Amino acid sequence: MSGTPEGPAHPDPPGTPPARPALTERELHDYRAAFRVSRLAMALVDRDGLVVAANDSLGALLGTDGAALREQAAADLVDLAADGRTWHAYREVLRGRRSRFRCTRRLKHPDGRKLWAEVTVAPVPDTGRVLLSVADISERRELQARLRHLQMHDPVTRLPNRALFFERLSAALECAAAESSEAATGAAGPTEPAGSPEPYRSPGAHRSYRSHGHGRTGRIGLCYLDLDGFKAVNDTLGHRVGDRLLAAVAGRLTECADSAGYTRSGGHLVARLGGDEFAVLVEDSTGTEQLADLARSVLASLERPFDLGGQRLSVSASIGVVERTAFGTTATGLMQAADTTLYWAKADGKARWTLFDPERNAHRMTRQALSSTLRPAVERGEFALEYQPLVDLAGGAVRGVEALVRWNHPQFGVLPPNRFVAIAEEDGSIVDLGRWVLRTACEQARRWQKDHPRERPLFVSVNVAVRQVWDSDLVADVAGILAETGLAPHLLQLELTESAVMGSAGRPLQALQALSDMGVRIAIDDFGTGYSNLAYLSRLPVSVLKLDGSFVRGFQDEEHPNPADELIVEALVQLAHRLGLTVTAECVETSGQAARLRRIGCDTGQGWLYSRAVAPERIAAMIEGTTPLRV
């Protein structure tokens, strides 16, 4: 017995929405009426991109009658072919490959006015056509533009602010990167699949959307300036006068950029970055000379006094100038270079412009790297001491050594003291480093003494920074280290520079006096290069004067000696001896120098004639006599 299945022979798969019932004639009439009278501008477009029907609102928006738009290319009416991405998306909707597409276009009304329109394209179900709707958003765009202008401009100077400056800078760099990439790869716009139907478009409708301007250089320049002493204007005359001065400065900066021709193709931007900082961005710059000319003109302009409602003010500026290839440059990198260069201009004396110097910046970066790793380097044991002999000029025997610290840096190799001691003084790590040097030097001096008990023990001379006296209990450190190592106090000599010792008062003077009372010898290093206040010598607990090497270098020309040099050194030696001080001459390099110093009466000498700074083992050989010295 056979039967007939209930329901359709080919049931719809689960989840399929029920088919929409066909529209009645009445409903179609209502839809057409709504289309015609709608205040929203609309058009029905076929798959070839031609207008099938348009309502009167669209005609009014475009300055014509809706019926007159039939058979016209919809893309031409609302400028959809102006750029490749929009054109491609529009065609995808026409082919049914995309469900919806929306864009914003700026249209020109036949009466000449411009209007902003939001264009939406969406398929009409079951018709093979699309509905194009156009909404006039001009008022909204104008409001957005006004709000953006307020957001992106400084209210005091009316110049672009920091946000707009970085937006413009980033856009310029991105454009340079894109053009460089296209030049290298020959990149083209989006391609169409083979065999795709080509919708109608009028000749020339599809225009290139890449702007390749004439005269592009692929470079970028920046003048970053800061007003010198502007805070004093605010503090003395008030912020109202300060704001008026900022506005006047902004006007002159704009005039400089305009008069110098930097407005070509809109390729410049004068901005206030905050406070009294301004920037002039030059796109497609032609080289450093162009930026230098701009900086010079800005300085000359600001030199003219400002007349602010009866207040006559003069102001100067410091300018950091950077000019380089735009490709590969980042906004952060450019601003860091400009900020560094501005700092150099300030440090070099203000009221000037300074050009970015890669070598100087590399030195700064190295200094910064050293600063960040200096304190941990003490803990990691990266420092070592070498010792340079201090030789008795009369007999030629080694009487002592000066401890000189070296940094075995894992990246930069062996660094002498002049590469890092100043940094250590600035960040305070000189206290820990100095304590390590002092302990290591005392331990080594005591070891030499134990290893050579029959020889006269050597004293060790250690350099001390003023900050060690202020930031640490130097007296307690020295006493503790001498007690730990067993080194006699008279075998330790502490060297301070003349500028540090001569100005000593209060705590530093008390510390020096306590150390001297302990038996430690105090030496003035580089004597003759600082204040040379001889009155201090009678009041300070000083035991030794170390003559700066500049005096000794005057003895190098043995055939034509300078009598004045010898007379000065002789007078200093005699004065020191009458005050009960001994004298050490630095930078002794020739036997002739040593002979003249010996004749004058100088006590000890130090320099390459005898030895460079060497490892402790070499000093031990000198004590034993296996390594002779030239005298």
Image: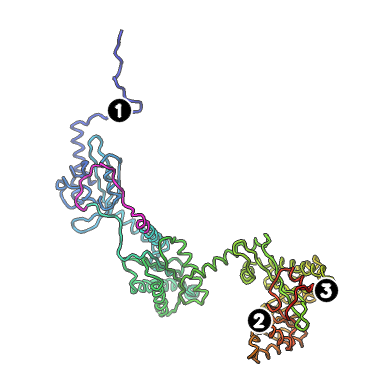
Q: Are marks 1 and 2 in contact (CB under 8 Å)?
A: no
Find out whether residue 191 is within the magenta segment.
yes
Q: Position of residue 535 (x, y in %)?
A: 71, 86
| Left or right of residue 559: residue 274 | left
User: Which amino acid, by three-letter code, is at mark 2?
Assistant: Gly
Residue 552 appears at what percent x and percent y?
66, 84
Q: List the residue tagged with mark 1.
A: 18
Q: Name the element at disc 3.
A: loop
Residue 549 has which mark?
Answer: 2
Q: Residue furthest bottom?
A: 563
Residue 213, image x and y in percent?
30, 62
Sequence-wise, which precedes: disc 3 or disc 2?
3
Q: Residue at x 29, y 55 (%)?
A: 209
Q: Quadrant of residue 169?
A: bottom left
* Numbered range of the magenta stretch: 180-204
Q: Main secondary structure of the magenta part?
A: loop
Q: On the image, numbered disc 3 is attached to which residue?
A: 455
Residue 20 sits above or below residue 2 on the image: below
Q: Quadrant of the N terminus?
A: top left
68 left or right, relative to 137: left
Question: Residue 610: which quarter of the image?
Answer: bottom right
Nearest to the observer: residue 599 or residue 519: 599
For badge 1, the amino acid type reads: Pro
